[in-house]
Image (cartoon, rainbow, N blue to C red):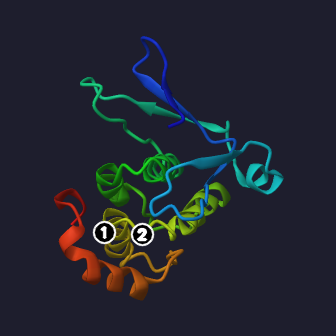
Amino acid sequence: EQIAVAQGTGMAAGKVLSRVDPLCIVNTLFPSQTVVHRNDPDWLQNMTGAGHFLYPVHISQAFLFPSTLAASLMLMLMRWFSRRYGDVFAIVDMCVSDTPLTGSEQQLWYAIACLNGDQHPDSVGCRCKFILATLSCEHLSLPFSEVTAVTQYCLRQADVSAACR
């Protein structure tokens, strides 16, 4: 993950000046490698602000506190890319908004679409949680098919871990 804790500050910094995509490897059921595009002009154009997020670290050093919707989305994406589905499931509730998304938030929102290829049962459970979290958000359109996600969940329900149900 791209999160580094600054010494003695109780803050963690995550760089967002690069687009991160899952690496598609043929004949790999659950790929976990990512490709970082540090100079993608379209991605950089939509990123507003300083280009990084500061995450306050809980005193137990067990978890982070995202301070904005964009920070929550980025944290969720990094956890999803690293296949930490239990963490993703917990973060999903922080990744919805009742107001229109900014350019950088919308860009991070639609980056979730590149995770459609992840067919791990817990990933399917996370997508279903995303559907439930966004039911009341009329202006948010999901970057994946709701019907497909629910169908996959029904077929794999026995394989989904307790943390992602």
Q: In the rendering, at what x and y percent does residue 73 appear? A: 49, 53
Q: Is residue 25 left or right of residue 1?
A: right
> Where 145 sits versus 162, above or below?
below
Q: Is residue 15 above or below residue 97?
A: above
Callout 1 secondary element: helix
Query: Which quadrant of the view contains residue 15?
Result: top right
Residue 78 in percent (x, y) is at: 49, 47
The reply, left or right, for residue 93 in relation to residue 118 is left
The tag on residue 119 is: 2
Q: Amino acid at mark 2?
A: Gln
Q: CA distance from mark 2 to mark 1?
A: 10 Å
Three-letter code for the amino acid on which mark 1 is drawn: Gly
Q: Residues within 10 Å of mark 1 (few under 14, many from 20)?
A: many
> Which one is nearer the viewer's eye here, 38 or 57?
38
Indicate which label's residue lies in the foreground, 2 or 1.
Answer: 2
The residue singled out by tag 1 in the image is 125
Q: Nearer the viewer, residue 67 or 61?
A: 61
Occupied quadrant, residue 36? top right
- Up-down relation of residue 66 to residue 24 (above or below): above
Q: Residue furthest top?
A: 8
Q: Residue 51: horizontal and vertical position, in percent?
A: 67, 38
SS assignment at label 2:
loop
For the point 50% across and 37% down, the residue is: 1
